[in-house]
Image (cartoon, grey):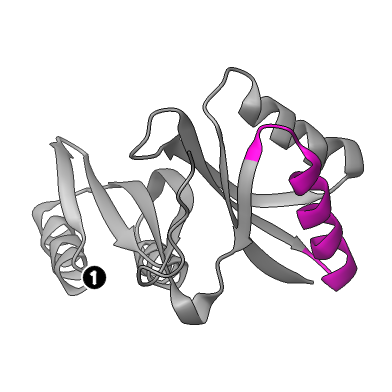
Amino acid sequence: MQSKVFQLIVDNTSGVLSRISGLFSRRGYNIESITAGTTADPKYTRITIVATGDDDILEQIEKQLRKLTDVRNIKELRPENSVYRELCMIKVETLDADQRVQIASIVEMFRAKIIDVADESLMMEIVGNTQKVEAFIKMMQGYNILEIARTGIAGLARGKEEVVYLP
């Protein structure tokens, strides 16, 4: 099993995300993560999908996505010429001041941020590639993790050559 990152530019219409996710569920394909947001042109939405499977399945996924009428452009975002980022928010229980200091030092090492302080918990955010987010979560496992929320990756190809211009 391997992962592939697909970037789709689609019409910004109601139900487009449902049609795309429906394609995956009908065929039994796995979505590892999916993110969506409008582009610089509000007529279009950029969707980043991380899918897993063998070579044949990943090729089928791309072919099936191309057939959808809402899809204006699709390409693979290869790691060597793309930048990926993920946002993760994590809340941990803090029992005393010593724990808060320890957690704050880990947060600083990872260039994360403490975004909420409550009597018995801290909430942090970290932005980075998936490996950085996973490493931060692993470091937090020494504490009582109360909640985690992750966005999945967003990505863009490097440079100007890969920019998609639509009419």
Tell me: residue 89, above or below residue 129. Answer: above
Q: As drawn, which residue projects farthest toward the bottom? A: 80
User: What residue range appears in magenta?
Assistant: 53-71
Q: Secondary structure at mark 1?
A: loop
Q: Nearer the viewer, residue 22 or 138?
A: 22
Q: Quadrant of residue 19?
A: top right
Q: Position of residue 88 (x, y in %)?
A: 37, 51
Query: Is residue 56 covered in magenta?
Result: yes
Q: How many marks?
A: 1
Q: Nearer the viewer, residue 157 or 141?
A: 157
Residue hosting label 1: 110
Q: In the rendered view, does 97 fall on the left or right side of 33?
A: left
Which residue: 76% across, 56% down?
62
Q: In the rendered view, does 92 fall on the left or right side of 116?
A: right
Q: As drawn, which residue projects farthest toward the front? A: 167
Question: Dot 1: within a 10 Å radius of its alpha carbon, few (fewer than 14), some, or many (20 or more) residues?
Answer: some
Q: Position of residue 14 (x, y in %)?
A: 58, 17
Q: Quadrant of residue 110?
A: bottom left
* Three-letter amino acid code of the residue under disc 1: Phe
Tell me: residue 15, above or below residue 23. Answer: above
Q: Nearer the viewer, residue 82 or 151?
A: 82
Q: Nearer the viewer, residue 33 or 149?
A: 33
Q: Position of residue 4 (x, y in %)?
A: 66, 66
